Amino acid sequence: MLPHLDRKLWRDLGHMKGQAVAVALVMACGLTMLIMARSLIYSLESTRDEYYRAHRFAEVFAYLKRAPLSLVERVRAIPGISAAQPGISVQVTLDIPGLDEPASGNVRSLPDFGEPELNRLFLRRGQWLQPGKRREVLVSEAFADANKLQPGHQIALLLNGRRQDFRVAGIVLSPEFIFESRPGAALPDNRTYGVFWMPYEELAYAFDLYGAFNSLTLKLEPGASERAVIAALDPLLEPFGGRGAFGRADHPSHIRVLDEIGVLRTLSIAFPIVFLSVAAFMTNAVLSRLLNLQREQIAILKAFGFGNRQIVLHYLKFAFVMVAGGTVLGSIGGYFQGQQLVKMYHLFFRFPELAFRLDRSAFVVALFVSAFAAVVGVFGAVRRAAKLPPADAMRPEPPANYRPALLERTGISHLLSHSFRIAVRNLERRPVQAFFTVAGLALATGIMIVPNCFRDSVTHVLGFQWDVVQRQDITVGLIEPGNRRAQHAFAHLPGVLAVEPLRSAFARISFQHRHRQIGIQGQPRAAQHSRVVAKGNTQIALPSDGIVVSSKLAEVLGAKIGDELHVEFLEGKRLVRDVTLLGLAEDLAGISAYMELDGLNRLMGEGDVVTGASFTIDAAHKADFLRALKTVPRIGWVAIKESLRENFAKTTAASINLIQMIYLVFATVVAFGVVYNNARISLAERSRELATLRVIGFSQGEVGAVLVTELVLLALCAVPLGLLLGTGFATAIVTQVNTETVRLPLVFTTHNFAFAVMVVTIASTLSGLLVLRRLNQLNLVGALRAPE
Amino acid sequence: MNSSSDNPPATARSQVFRARGLTKVYGSGDAEVRALAGVDLDLRAGELVVLLGPSGSGKTTLLNMLGGLDVPTDGELAYRDLDLTHATDPQLTRYRRDSVGFIFQFYNLIPSLTARENVGLITEIARDPMAPEAALEMVGLSPRLDHFPAQLSGGEQQRVAIARAIAKRPEVLLCDEPTGALDVRTGIVVLEAIERVNRELGTLTVIITHNAVMADMADRVIHFSDGRVHHIHENASRARPDSLKW
Ligand SMILES: Nc1ncnc2c1ncn2[C@@H]1O[C@H](COP(=O)(O)OP(=O)(O)OP(=O)(O)O)[C@@H](O)[C@H]1O
Ligand SMILES: [Mg+2]
């Protein structure tokens, strides 16, 4: 049989179920996010690791110009290498029927017989390449999906300038392309860039590379030092045009997955902390009020010999029931939410199978964290109650000390209505209560700011990246560096309004012991297309010597303005130079380094070299332009701003917005919960007093006016405070999204603030109405009875 | 009827409480209140004592000390071998749990528990309790077992409180104005219940009241004023509660 104290527990809880549910819901929101985010992290990490293991993802990667296959034996002799896979990797141009713009791609070789040792493919649809059968390719899934390619379809590749038709044998995935994007591009466009695999022999003949390789991937022995292997490998490849080997930490696809996990990790901590703090606060408010109402009951329990421990436990159980409710709800919520969200990752990550995997340890963490929050929230109050000397508790609370409110003493009291005066006096008389209400409303307001700040930041990125920074419509890259003449040809294409040359040079930039391999962008001094923008959206005029880098890159390298960066060019004459860091660019995606075009060429010891150009196009002639572009030889790739923007909006922005929507719903739930809870508590604490007002002749309307006036006064204090608080929350959380692939700027809009105020106002109004309805049911007789 | 006839003479009973120079001071400095100013008192097993005195004379304070709800500032107070002046909190809790039953003016039932459960709450932690139903039977509330306090009249609630206090068979029953909130008829019903418990279970019973008429039902009447025992009056015989007139 249930102990009697527990029966009391359940009946009391039944009595305050609205509030208990509100607390449990807020807690559930926090836990849903915690469990969802942790499970997504677990799903991504474990799926990725299994994929890497099963498909033997390499650990060291190197590209070079051309080396004989015999070199591989010498590579294998380097200590610490357990497997080496040479191959061919070339950039090609494609012709996709129905696609206006030229597409480009990366074609890679597969051994003519048997599976590759490293980076094995996963066949999604269709068939593997048949030995001896020619004119067949395997196509990456992201590209195939974007262009609706199926096994059996034909596709035209321009191999070394010769157009050839290929049959799509199968659609595949590669552990090297979980995230598939053109090298150097911060944002993917799967429609115009794809990865293809062909037999070694066929590819080698097409590019005059038979008996040679230009890409190499390695797997290390357990415990081997990547650093040491790369140090031994680079001199070996250098004579063959090696561009510097790198590890997984520099692998574009790997970094993207890592970054995504990093963002999730932040969210899995930051959001639950905010929500659970609110829940802890609410638990405290609910229990403090309960203890206040039950002073006499506590005294009775003590008078009859219940010990402090039993009483503390009894009241902690109230909190634990809410925790348990919140944990169950949160677990269910996290499970289903996670299952929905994991589908979103299919948008940009390609795994053979990415199933939602529940992180069971998250439950334990959830239970522990929420129980901790609840105990922190209530322990003080409960202990105070237990400490209450029983004889004291038996006495009703001392009568309140009423006096004219501050406002009245200012001498304008005759201007104030009766209800207003009572309301003001009440607030002054119960400063702690007023504080709790203000804090609750402020939290509710603050929590609304965060998700919309996310949305506004993403919108800003979309606008900033493409309207302020990238003013060109189309960017074109050459297969091989060319000279200014190429630019001349570009200028004569139909519909061109302006053209600017650009040059990209692959280099390893290092400062002290940190380094990154990236393409240094050379462009005109004050480019009108790809503008380099500093803090405050002012354009940086590129100096003729010296370098400007993304502030994120400077952070990664640990360098500051004025430092000498060590630049090893990995192409051309492969010069090694020290360049002064002269400026920081506030770009929001990827990490970049910028130099003035002529300065870059000078530094590389080269003349008038360009690798591409950017265009602004007369919109009316866009189709003509693209058609003409398809006929220009040696075009490696084409990036159309609108497609990129659309693509970004469909993937990254969509995912952030989805998360933002979920959080917005949660924040709204919390705002309502807090406000409702506050209104209920203040009604419960005051029912006796309000009933007295009614008994001595106040009308229902007048009593209601007292309550409403109080609520409005408190809200007026709380809302500005809440906006401030929300700004703080959002700053703390949004600035955490700061990875090498994407950074969110902190953007606060009046729309955001107005929305928060509106939600809290609506919630307050509804809660107010609910409470007013209860006021009608106020039991005048009951409220005036002797204390039970 | 002289209901004390089946009890041994008061002086022959064993001593339960012994107070010497018992003092309780609230506050300090200007706000200092001497609620008890040196009380000397002995209370014996099984007797029924009525405590009379003007408002503010310290009656409730004394009762709280006796029941272990509060500790004295000075003086000695012992319950049998237990020194209540220096008892620790767990000792006091134990003492209240095993030996004391309280009845208050405002009943102080737990509103979320029924009559039966209010009693059961206490018997659950007691050493040698009677069944809650039996305790409620003694106060004539068998038909109201499963009613919540809000569904009971004041007198009925007070009788539940009595049942709750006696169900653990306490050695001491402490009542602070048990009829203060009740009308005459109901007051008599409540007093009868208390008297019956005192008689049948031999419980030392202390009743605080403002109603001098109730003095007639006591073995001894202690007159209290200014935090001291003014004088003690011993009744030759106890009057039955239903014969009291007020
Ligand atoms: N917690 C306290 N703090 C300060 N003074 C107190 C406290 N409790 C009691 N007193 C004071 O001690 C004195 C005795 O109080 P007590 O409650 O014992 O009187 P009483 O005889 O029971 O009065 P009544 O018949 O009105 O109940 C009073 O003057 C009272 O104001
Ligand atoms: Mg009193």
Image (tube, coloured by chain):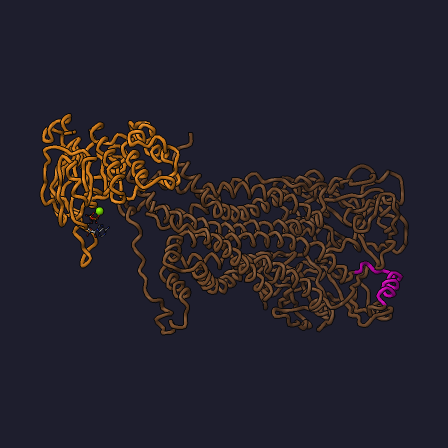
Chain colours: A brown, B orange
Q: Which residues are magenta?
A: A621-638
Q: Residue furthest top?
A: B6
Q: Residue A351's spot in the image, x, y percent?
A: 71, 43
Q: Main secondary structure of the magenta part?
A: helix
Q: Residue B199's spot in the image, x, y percent?
A: 20, 29
| Most foreground residue, A425 or B159 | B159
State yes or no: residue B95 in magenta: no
Task: From the viewer's perspective, tell me whether residue A151 is left or right of residue A430.
Answer: right
Q: Name the residue: 89% across, 43% down.
A: A134
| Most foreground residue, A329 or A155 | A329
Quarter of the figure that contains the N terminus of chain A? top left
Quarter of the figure that contains the C terminus of chain A? top left
State yes or no: residue A636 in magenta: yes
Task: From the viewer's perspective, tell me whether residue A547 is left or right of residue B27.
Answer: right
| Most foreground residue, A695 or B110 | A695
Whether residue A599 is visible here, answered yes or no, is yes
Res A73 quadrant in image: top right
Q: Residue A171's spot in the image, x, y percent?
A: 80, 43
Task: From the viewer's perspective, tell me whether residue A721 is left or right of residue A381.
Answer: right
In the depicted structure, whether residue A48 falls above or below residue A676:
above
In the depicted structure, whether residue B90 falls above or below residue A648:
above
Q: Residue B108's spot in the image, x, y percent?
A: 31, 42
The number of numbered discs placed on residues in the rendered structure image is 0
